[in-house]
Image (cartoon, rainbow, N blue to C red):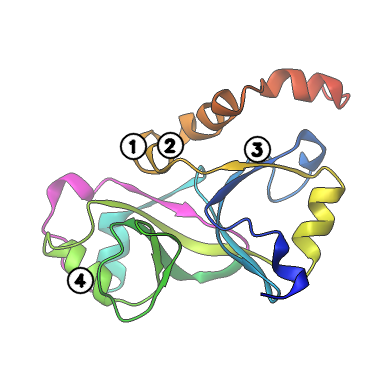
């Protein structure tokens, strides 16, 4: 381990502070998948888009035989590589291209996981996104120092079991913070 890797926010949530109201990340809850001396990679977990899993599977020509998943929303994972799919999932399993985040959660970019999901053989919990959030080396540390983010231990229950619109509020509640109070303190109505 190098000196720069002392702060490791992998498997942490980042909550966008109200000062970021004008940014892509306004009111975002980000799950940090990787954080090291090369930078950081995260997935926004509370921004569903109009695309459903059924529509996505149709576009990539993968059969989706799980009726209960057809209307599951795909999420905006962040502004980097928005044309590429990312699957945040639990359990990790054995896929062609997976970044293990902890003992339970992985981030997979290979198509084999979607084919397995289509056949009902995929991971129990999943969140499919287009794009991710990325930071250059030292950038996330700088943004944290500027109070752009609150960080806290991630909750798989919040990510996988709650509806997208409840995730930010649930994380704030777990942290013991009220977003409305933060907004007023920052001078935003």
Q: Quadrant of the N terminus?
A: bottom right
Q: Residue 27, labelled with which disc?
A: 3
Q: Is residue 172 above or below residue 84?
A: above
Q: Which residue is mark 2?
A: 158
* Overall secondary structure of the magenta section: loop
Q: Is residue 171 above or below residue 133?
A: above
Mark nearer the N terminus (3 vs 1) = 3
Q: Residue at x 28, y 57 (%)?
A: 91
Q: Residue at x 76, y 48 (%)?
A: 23
Mark nearer the N terminus (2 vs 4) = 4
Mark nearer the N terminus (3 vs 2) = 3
Distance, label 3 to label 4, CA atoms, is: 32 Å
Task: Give the magenta-colored segment's residue range.
Answer: 61-79
Tag nearer the camera, 3 or 1: 1
Distance, label 3 to label 2, CA atoms, is: 15 Å
Lateral position of residue 85 relative to residue 47, left or right = left
Q: How packed is label 2: few (under 14 Cα within 10 Å), some, or many (20 or more)? A: some
The spot of residue 112 in percent (x, y) is 25, 76
**Marks 3 and 4 in Cβ contact (< 8 Å):** no
Tag nearer the camera, 3 or 2: 2
Q: How packed is label 3: few (under 14 Cα within 10 Å), some, or many (20 or more)? A: some
Q: Quadrant of the C terminus?
A: top right
Q: Is residue 184 above or below residue 13?
A: above
Q: Which residue is mark 1?
A: 161
Distance, label 2 to label 1, CA atoms, is: 6 Å
The spot of residue 134 in percent (x, y) is 65, 66
> Please, what secondary structure does the residue beneath circle 1 have?
helix
Q: Which residue is mark 4?
A: 115
**Marks 2 and 1 in Cβ contact (< 8 Å):** yes
């Amino acid at each position: 381990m190098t000196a720069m890797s002392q702060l490791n926010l992998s498997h942490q949530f980042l909550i966008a502070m109200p000062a970021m109201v004008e940014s892509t990340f306004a009111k975002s809850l980000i799950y940090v998948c990787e954080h090291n001396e090369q930078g950081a990679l995260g997935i926004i977990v509370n921004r569903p888009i109009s695309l459903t899993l059924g529509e996505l599977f149709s576009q990539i020509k993968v059969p989706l035989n799980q009726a209960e998943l057809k209307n599951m929303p795909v999420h905006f994972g962040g502004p980097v590589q928005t044309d590429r799919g990312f699957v945040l999932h639990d359990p990790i399993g054995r896929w062609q291209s997976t970044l293990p985040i902890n003992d339970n959660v992985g981030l997979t970019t290979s198509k084999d996981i979607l084919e397995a999901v289509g056949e009902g053989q995929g991971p129990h919990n999943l969140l499919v996104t287009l794009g991710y959030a990325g930071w250059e080396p030292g950038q996330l540390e700088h943004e944290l120092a500027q109070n752009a983010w609150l960080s806290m231990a991630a909750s798989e229950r919040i990510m996988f079991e709650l509806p997208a619109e409840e995730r930010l509020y649930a994380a704030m509640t777990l942290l013991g913070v009220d977003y409305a109070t933060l907004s007023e303190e920052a001078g935003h109505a």
